[in-house]
Image: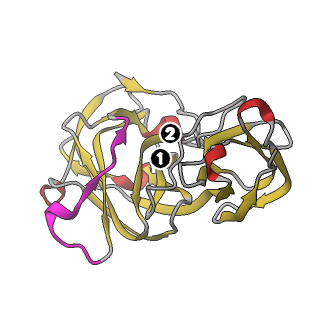
Amino acid sequence: MKRNFIFPLMLCGLLGFSACNDDSENTGTAKMQVRMTDAPGDYEEVNIDIKSVQIIKEGDTDEADWITMEEIHPGIYNLLDFANGRDTLLASANLPAGTISQIRLILGDNNTLKLKDGTTVALKTPSGQTSGIKLKIDAELEEDVTYMLLLDFDAAKSIVPRGNGQYNLKPVVRTITQAIAGGIKGKVTPAEYKPGIYVISAANDTIGGFANDNGDFLIKGVPAGTYKVKFYTEGNAHDKTIENVSVTQNQVKDLGTVELPKE
């Protein structure tokens, strides 16, 4: 079955409260989403069978060093469904902070091309790509920041006629990496109050989390903007609100130590 719908961009925050668990102890990672788009080609369909998405860090060279992105949406994708600014989410994962040097798409065998006359033919992948399609990205991932890696296929250039009605798939793909969300972190005192934390936008969209036993908190996936940060405690006796907290898309805003009111 072809996937011909668009996956919405999900960062962790939704309308209303989104209970994102505290990640303050899981340091050293960044969130990456891999999305796919396409430049139009002169075909009815260009169907790519994607099984897996993997990345490798700078300096790693062994086959065992490839990291498979755990949240994958495998399937047969018609590239032409994602032309004219549309895209779709292929995979996402928490990855080690640092430089990611390459991404690899593992393809299945059900790659096809539908011509303008309605004929459907198989797309053959050259033998040199049997281990997957490797693309250089050289993206520097900052700890706790959320990134989007856009794979911009060129369908017209990716299809190579072989003669006798046969076609090869030799993907021509431009990679674009950008930070799309930052975060807010800090430490509350006294730690035993263990507050819930709401990050509230001007439109009342809310992202939430909790401080841990040491009072540390980290709210990830916060899009660039200005927020109110509310600390809620049992019985509301120690609640506190911090206004005008500004977050940029490539930054984790550090609120430092937040002192909650005492009785």
Quarter of the rendering containing residue 172? bottom left
* Residue at x 34%, y 55% (from the top left corner): 171
Quadrant of image for the C terminus: top right
| 169 magenta-colored | no
Quadrant of image for the N terminus: top left
Q: Amino acid at mark 1?
A: Met
Q: Nearer the viewer, residue 163 or 151?
A: 151
Residue sticking out furthest to the top: 1
- Give the side of residue 71 with respect to residue 204, left or right: left
**Label number found at residue 88:** 2
Residue 151 visible in this rendered orientation of the protein: no
- Give the side of residue 142 with respect to residue 125, left or right: right
* Cβ–Cβ under 8 Å for marks 2 and 1: yes
* Residue at x 28%, y 44% (from the top left corner): 52
* Residue at x 47%, y 45% (from the top left corner): 41
The residue wearing badge 1 is 36
The magenta stretch is 59-73
* Residue at x 58%, y 34% (from the top left corner): 8
Residue sticking out furthest to the left: 127
Residue 11, percent across and down? Answer: 59, 43
Q: Amino acid at mark 2?
A: Thr
Q: Is label 1 in a helix, a strand or a loop?
A: strand
Vertical side of 203 occupied by 36: above or below: below
Residue 161, percent across and down? Answer: 27, 50
- Give the side of residue 242 with respect to residue 89, left or right: right
- Give the side of residue 143 with respect to residue 99, left or right: right
Q: Nearer the viewer, residue 33 or 88?
A: 33
